[in-house]
Amino acid sequence: MQLKPLTDFYAGRFALFKARIFVFLKGLVMVNDQYYMKLALEEAKKALAIEEVPIGAVVICKDKVVGRGYNFKERAHDPTGHAEIIALRDAANNLASWRLDQCQLYVTVEPCPMCAGAIVQARIKRLVYGAADPKAGATGSLYNLVEDERFNHQVTELKGGVLAEECRDLLKGFFNSLRKTDTRKGG
């Protein structure tokens, strides 16, 4: 009786099966990331409609949107009126807890230092962003505050570049039109 070759045969089959499942699940995550980033883009378009910088964010918990936000800084005269902050507040109110440790945040542009700090404080486990921000990005471009081990909490998973071109194009279009006809005060 030859058990060794039979065991090797099944071990090889099992490894192939595991690899296929991994690829399938990775594909599902990618599809979900794109879906949720499109929801964040919808929020960004709301900001664009009121002449705010078009950045949008959604907070997801157990595959449900629990928080939404878009930039509202100019209208509210509020320096903290960033999409991420508004979405985090909305999620905290909806979940009746500031601890969002089972949640994911999707945002169209890499968070700034203020928003990255709020993300760490909210205990967000997964952060997904669209376009990088080389001038103010605090999740990899200039700093990486959300994975800094000197803090007592970090984002478990960080992913950038999801629908980056769409996110970047929305911003570029906004700033190009703003340069042509600047109707806002203070710049």
Image (cartoon, rainbow, N blue to C red):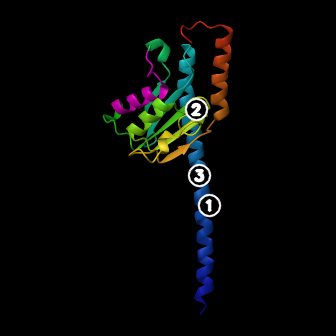
Can you identify the residue that label 2 sits on?
38
In the image, residue 107 above or below residue 46: below
Pick whichever of labels 2 and 1 is earlier in the sequence: 1
Question: Of the residues shown, which amino acid type is indicated by label 1?
Answer: Arg
Pick whichever of labels 2 and 3 is earlier in the sequence: 3
For the residues marked 2 and 1, what is the alpha-carbon distance in whole angstroms?
Answer: 27 Å
Can you identify the residue that label 1 sits on?
20
Question: Of the residues shown, which amino acid type is indicated by label 2?
Answer: Lys
Quadrant of the frame with the C terminus: top right
Contact, mark 2 vs mark 3 (Cβ under 8 Å): no
Query: At numbered mark 2, what does the secondary structure look like: helix, strand or loop?
Result: helix
Residue 78: name its quadrant.
top left
Left or right of 50? Residue 176 is right
Residue furthest to the left in view is 96
How far from the left and from the top, in percent, is residue 150?
43, 46
Q: Give the class, few, some or many, for how many residues have Cα within 10 Å of label 2's Cα (few <14, many ≥20).
A: many
Q: Main secondary structure of the magenta part?
A: helix
Q: Give the residue drawn at x 63%, y 23%.
A: 171
Query: At numbered mark 1, what does the secondary structure look like: helix, strand or loop?
Result: helix
Q: Which residues are magenta?
A: 78-93
Q: Give the residue drawn at x 56%, y 8%.
A: 184
Can you identify the residue that label 3 sits on?
26
